[in-house]
Image (cartoon, rainbow, N blue to C red):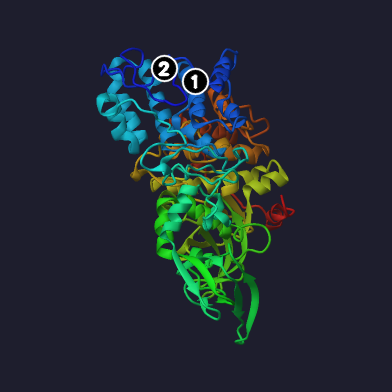
Amino acid sequence: MSSSQNILTRPSAGPGAVPGTGVAALPALDDPVQSESGRQFEKLWLQPDPPDVCEFLAQRRNLPPAECVEVIQVDQVRRWPRGIGLSAETYLRFLKSVGLVADELVEWALVISEFAVLSRQRSTSDGDALLTEFCSRFPHLSDRLRRQVTQPDSDPTRPVLRPAESSGSDPLAATRVNIRHPDPIDLDATTLDIDSGDGSSLTLEAVGVVHDPLSVLGRCTPFAKLPPILVRRIEDRMQHVRFEPGEYLMRQGEAGDGLFVLTKGWVRIEATDPSGQSHAIAESGPGEILGEMALLTDEPRTASVVATEPVEASFLPGRVFDEMATEYPVISRLLTQLLAERLGHSGRDALAGKTLNRYRIRQRLGRGGMAIVYQAEDLESAETVALKMMSHRLVYDADSLRLFQREASIIESFDHPNIVRMLGRFKAFRSYFIVMEFCDGVSLDRISRQHGPLPEVVVRLVLTQLATALRYAHDRNVVHRDIKPSNVMLTRTGDVKLMDFGLANPLDEGSTTGHIAGTPRYMAPEQLRGEPVDTRADLFAFGMTAWKLITGRDLITEKSLIGIQKRHAAWKIPPLEGVPEDLAQLVYTCLSLNPAERSLDPLLAQPANLEPPAPHFVARLMEIPEGR
């Protein structure tokens, strides 16, 4: 194994040689483990049951990147020969989910060590096929993979993880370990690999950052959380401005073209009401940030700011903010925290009552990892609609924006009574919105949690409609990838609506691989391993959903990714007692480990003569206490 400073080495010809090439360009798998954490984890492999590497690392959140990688490499070397290997994507998804660093350097270390382990296992004739497979899984690393395997001299031995005090030409390339999200991974929530890169390895520091005493930004929140080198880069792009008493720094109603950081003097903040009366709101002094909301939302300024004495300030133009936020999205994540505190959280939402485009927002309906959903009124038609707004923290993330726009395009192309309809899309508030039909009902997840096992008539009604919606999407080569009870709505009229195509993938864009996307407890085994998936992955999730509706509980209750994969490896479905044979057989078929055996044909082949439950029964299902 590797040392804490040199994760990837290119040893002499031996165990690490690539089959079919004769080139030893891979990690020396038999090197001794260097770190104490690595040795501790290696000892756990002496026990009868394989250790849970995720649990091990989750308990050691402050490990340096090199030690995290070494622990995982021990797991790779021990796990793959036993036939229970985990993909590099799985490890990376976990590292990100618990806030450990998982940048491109860590990714490369884990990818190349997995390649080394598999190359040792496979025959000589499989060498080229293995390289092709990895280049397909990691297209952004394909050139480097080919060089490393076929031209070792062009990629000389060097540290894969650079120390924090990097001596390179760009200090921003330094790798840092920071806790982004202290909470453990939520296996009930959708997990999506959308935080794959931020232009550098930099992350937000809550404590321990020491800025130059003369730094303007380093003394004020929230810039104080940024690394000093990045703060200096921002300050280099700011303009020093002065204002005399009575001069306006900004005026109510004008476009937000940048933000100010006061460095000297005091200002008065005032707003003019509809009658034309001006009212003083507050005063601000040195260290205060002004104008960030208009900059972040593209909305007109909501107040005026006037100097009450000689004022000096640093001004960050909007165009510079956009350029730097694109290059270093950690900046946008930092500043949009100010906006996120007002959007989508408990209490009064900043958008409530606002009119965007032609829609007046009434209330927030829900908040997810990528978006916030609002109930709104179409002022032209008086129709109630749902607005799905992309989270501001992702606006500068090209991959996230692509996924959000892809979801809109997919729904826009659909026309099915059991799939939520799209009514339009627009850009406002410096974000992106999808307008969808408003479904007046309750999710199957809430219904199941409140009522437990559902009556057969309801189960058949729901599954038949959900199956027709899936068949419609699959016939158009779209994989949903996140079928689960919380993404299916039962309306007050007894209609089923499939929602949330945020992870959906058109098959004509290629196999979905390289990232683990979905909700772990409902994901097909091949999906959880990060392998290519097709429409049959949705059928497995359909079976898991059916199981919960029939029994009132989840089939998989394990609380870690490793635990779920262990369950898949020893897959055994308990009998569904007291359930009609055809319904039970449908569930068993969909939950097959072999994708080729999964099918909805038995259900869809039945006559469509199901009578919906009586309205009063559906109404009773809707009666769910608040908070359930």
The structure residue drawn at horizontal position 41% and vertical position 61%, both measured from the top left corner, is 320
Secondary structure beneath dot 2 equals loop
Q: Please, what is the three-letter code of the amino acid marked with disc 1?
A: Val
Secondary structure beneath dot 1 equals helix
Residue 602 position, x and y percent, is: 50, 37
Q: Which residue is mark 2?
A: 29
Question: Quick check: 246 above or below 565?
Answer: below
Residue 371 position, x and y percent, is: 53, 54
Residue 145 position, x and y percent, is: 31, 30
The residue nearer to you, when weighing 135 against 627, is: 135
Q: Which residue is mark 1?
A: 74
The structure residue drawn at horizontal position 60% and vertical position 84%, both measured from the top left corner, is 274
The residue nearer to you, when weighing 171 against 386, is: 171
Q: Please, what is the three-letter code of the amino acid marked with disc 2?
A: Leu
Question: Quick check: 315 above or below 150?
Answer: below
Residue 621 position, x and y percent, is: 70, 52
Quadrant of the image occupied by residue 26: top left
The residue nearer to you, when weighing 88 against 455, is: 88
Is residue 256 among the parts visible in the rendering? no
The residue nearer to you, when weighing 96 against 484, is: 96
